Image: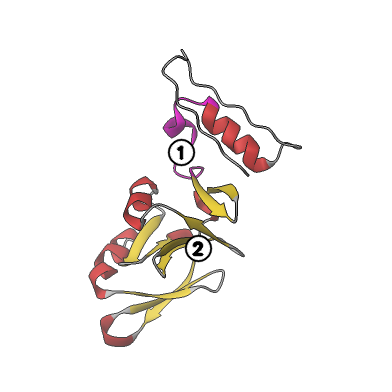
Amino acid sequence: MKVDLFISRDIEEPYAEIHSDSLTDNIQKAMDLLENDNVEEEYDGNSSILAVKKGQDIVLLDFKDIYMIRVEDKQTKVYTENRNYLVKKPLYQIEENLNSDFVRISKSVIVNLRKIERVAPSLRGMMFIELKNGLKDNISRKYLSDFKKALDL
């Protein structure tokens, strides 16, 4: 999807036009987001969204659909059940907007606590995590106490 932004001091109220051959779920979400000035109220912790890229398309993901956000080869990737997407923002900026379902487990990884399949001991005091979609990673010692707090352990 192509997106154009025009900034003008001559308009009284911002407006957006979307040109499409059909109304998709993502376009409806974008319209809802743009029409609502109180986005924080409408999108509570379980229905917040993150804009990501898949090729040329912009996809709006519900937080509840995100399994993991990980930096790989200097790119921030967002993983869902069966797909992965790119985000231009650094991990710390994304983390600021996430709800309490998400916790950082290492310098380069944030996971959705609701998508954890199992947690087990790993090497040198670290913990191993496996998500319900099969993704695996290590919880570093530095972030282990925050992870345990998030799980109320």
- Quadrant where the C terminus sits is bottom left
- Report which residue position mark 2 lands on: 115
73 relative position to 24: left or right: left
On residue 4, which mark appears? Answer: none
- Quadrant where the N terminus sits is top right
Number of other residues with Cα within 10 Å of mark 2, as a class: few under 14, some 14 to 19, many 20 or more:
many
- Report which residue position mark 1 lands on: 44
Q: Which residues make up the magenta segment? A: 35-49
Q: Is residue 111 above or below residue 7?
A: below
Residue 94, position as x, y percentages in the image: 38, 51
Q: Nearer the viewer, residue 39 or 113?
A: 39
Number of other residues with Cα within 10 Å of mark 1, as a class: few under 14, some 14 to 19, many 20 or more:
few
Residue 105, position as x, y percentages in the image: 34, 67
Q: Earlier in the sequence, mark 2 or mark 1?
A: 1
Name, please, the residue furthest toward the right: 21
150 relative position to 58: left or right: left
Q: Residue shown at 58%/55% (left/top)? A: 54
Gap in Å between the C-alphas at discs 2 and 1?
A: 19 Å
Residue 74, position as x, y percentages in the image: 39, 66
Q: Residue shown at 34%/78% (left/top)? A: 127
Q: How is the image coloured?
A: secondary structure
Residue 71, located in which quarter of the rendered image? bottom left
125 relative position to 121: left or right: left
Would you say residue 95 is visible in this rendering?
yes
Dominant SS type (magenta):
loop
Q: Is residue 101 above or below residue 138?
A: above
Q: Is residue 61 above or below residue 138?
A: above
Does the magenta segment cover residue 47?
A: yes
Which secondary structure lies at badge 2?
A: helix
Q: Residue shown at 32%/87% (left/top)? A: 123
